[in-house]
Image: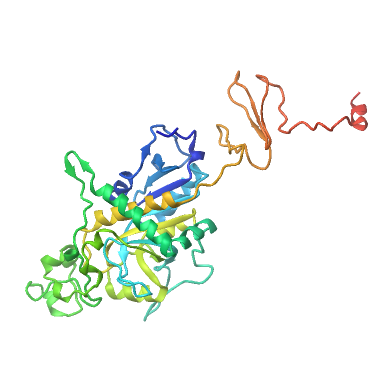
Amino acid sequence: MAVPPASRNDFEIAIVCALPFEYDAVSHLIDEYYNENYGRATRDPNIYTNGRVGAFNVVIVLLSGIGKVKAASATASLRSSYPNLELVLVTGTCGGVPKTGAGKEIVLGDVVISSAVVQFDLGRLYPDEFETKNTLNDSLGRPALHIQNLIITLKTWRGLQLLERRTAFHLEKLQNLHSDGEAIRYEYPGAENDHLYPASYLHKHRSTEPCRECNGDPGAVCKASRKLSCRELGCDVQQCVPRKRLQDSEGLRVPRVHVGCLGSGDTMLKSGEARDRIAKENGLVAFEMEGAGAWDEIPCIVVKGICHYADSHGDKSWQNFAAATAASVAKALVEKYPRTDKPPNARQRDDLGHDLYNNGPSFSSHSPGRTMKLISNNRNRALSSDPRHALAYDRNEDFMSRPDINSKRN
């Protein structure tokens, strides 16, 4: 077992989840949990779980709800409590676009990693269209440089292959878990249950079901149908779009990872036609609801597993598998992330959180009777107990005297 970190300042990576089942999938892949209570900053309402993944100290936080506002508030508080975080992974599930701009098929269970995030529901609503605001002042900006460098390696063949290989390893571990003698359901639901309907094919009562509203107008959908499954409504699976990847059901047990631009907003997209239009306009590969809130607050990467196609036919049967694939990719990313060397005199902070290794020397005093430590860029020097004064500078061996000043003191 690793030695637990001394304080919150020793944590480098955080994982943020919006929903309990997403949090559960991540929690099963933590290598070690720390029992210590590291507390939190003043006015921070978050509840934290602390542990280790590989060589990194990791903190996990579960949001109180979905959406940008919840994510922004939680990550701002996270940063105040854990000031030395280098990387935050916003991990969970999302809705996928059936094909990337390059024509690659995306299927349920695949994982998307953000190279950029667009607020697709931020804009102006005109009588004939909704115009997304994407000017420089409205955009979320580019990721931090160290995150850009990590993402670019995932766009190489070797980098992506290594990531997917480790993802498969962690996913198998998740699928072999048992709780109270019963398997935790992270199994692949099967290619036969991966249904992509044409964008214009609505989720509504069909002619076999008596519904005056649905059967009257071809474009009308009753509210009751929104809560029913495709099987209950009679959606015709023969109408589904053929997918080449679904023909290899064995290969689908290991998800593919897609790196691209994600659409983020407080609107849960449930329209195939709107999905295709917005994705084409902004070059998106998926839609989710928390990334935009965290993006401006802290250096982050959005890692989401696809559990539906952002249309009206989505259900919850793919949620656990998609959460498991996203958690597996998140752990593989943490393993891939390079550790940053600490300076010879590693950064230290006193009990009040004051930085003792920032822009030269400083010192920290503790309770009476304890030794005061003088910390400089060159050495740590112990002082006598209960000193009257402490100068946070090294002695200058070449200094002799200043008679012009000393004479005035006499």
Residue 275 screen position, x and y as percent: 32, 72
Q: Is 75 or 158 nearer to us in this picture? A: 158
Question: Which of the 4 image quadrants contains residue 345?
Answer: top right
Q: How is colour applied across the structure in the image?
A: rainbow
Residue 96 screen position, x and y as percent: 31, 66
Residue 304 visible somewhere in the drawing: yes
Which quadrant, please, contains the N terminus? top left
> In the drawing, does residue 45 fall left or right of residue 326?
right
Residue 130 screen position, x and y as percent: 39, 75
| Number of marks present in the image shown | 0
Q: Is residue 339 above or below residue 291?
A: above
Which quadrant, please, contains the C terminus? top right
Residue 94 screen position, x and y as percent: 32, 61
Q: Is 211 or 231 nearer to us in this picture? A: 231
Q: Is residue 396 above or below residue 233?
A: above
State the residue at coordinates (25%, 62%): 252
State the residue at coordinates (38%, 63%): 265
Q: Is 279 or 52 nearer to us in this picture? A: 52
State the residue at coordinates (22%, 66%): 248
